[in-house]
Image: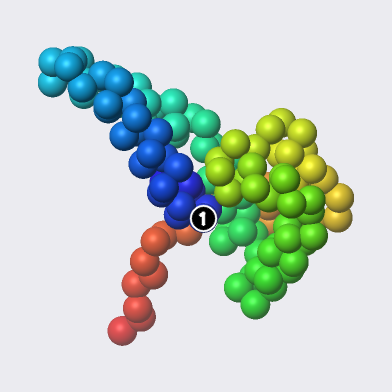
């Protein structure tokens, strides 16, 4: 899954193709193969998870639209690579460059913090 867009199709297809290529492997080897793929995917998508933390922990809810306004002004090929989970180093630098839509101290706190809980408990 893409950490920000929740797109699954490109990753599902890549996994299906890997499974087809290695379908004759014994179960333990196939499991190890997919464990390695999962670990590489986790490492490769770190940038996107960091952006998500900055979006949800640095931007006030009513101001998050500014992040998207800025992002969708970027060049279309960059956005396409972003959605495919294939952002280049130059893409990442471009996404992070310019006037930030969130305060820099808030972004740093978001990156260094534990992150927001997925579910907020209701006060009684």
Q: Is residue 123 above or below residue 66?
A: below
Which residue is rendered at x = 65% and y = 48% of the image?
80
Residue 105, x across and y down, in percent: 73, 52
Quadrant showing the C terminus? bottom left
Residue 39, x across and y down, in percent: 39, 27
- Mark 1 lies on a secondary structure that is loop
Which residue is rendered at x = 13% and y = 21% of the image?
27
Q: Quadrant of residue 23?
A: top left
**Drawn side of residue 52 relative to residue 102, left or right:** left
**Drawn side of residue 83 relative to residue 8, left or right:** right
**Which residue occupies the foreground of this view, 28 or 11?**
11
Q: Residue furthest bottom?
A: 124
- Number of residues whose C-alpha sits closer than 10 Å to that of mark 1, classed few (under 14), some (14–19) or many (20 or more): few
Q: Quadrant of residue 68?
A: bottom right
> Which residue lies under the disc numbered 1?
5
**Drawn side of residue 41 relative to residue 20, left or right:** right
Q: Is residue 92 in sight in this rendering?
A: yes
Q: Is residue 35 in sight in this rendering?
A: no
Q: Quadrant of residue 62?
A: bottom right
**Drawn side of residue 22 relative to residue 44, left or right:** left
Q: Is residue 124 above or below residue 44?
A: below
């Amino acid at each position: 899954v893409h950490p920000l867009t929740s797109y699954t199709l490109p990753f599902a297809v890549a996994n299906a193709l890997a499974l087809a290529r290695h379908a004759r492997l014994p179960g333990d080897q196939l499991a190890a193969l997919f464990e390695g793929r999962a670990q590489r995917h986790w490492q490769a998508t770190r940038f996107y998870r960091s952006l998500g933390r900055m979006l949800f922990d640095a931007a006030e809810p009513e101001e998050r639209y500014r992040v998207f306004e800025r992002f969708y002004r970027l060049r279309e090929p960059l956005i396409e690579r972003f959605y495919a989970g294939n952002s280049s180093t130059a893409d990442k630098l471009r996404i992070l460059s310019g006037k930030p839509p969130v305060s820099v101290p808030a972004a740093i706190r978001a990156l260094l913090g534990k992150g927001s809980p997925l579910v907020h408990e209701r006060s009684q």
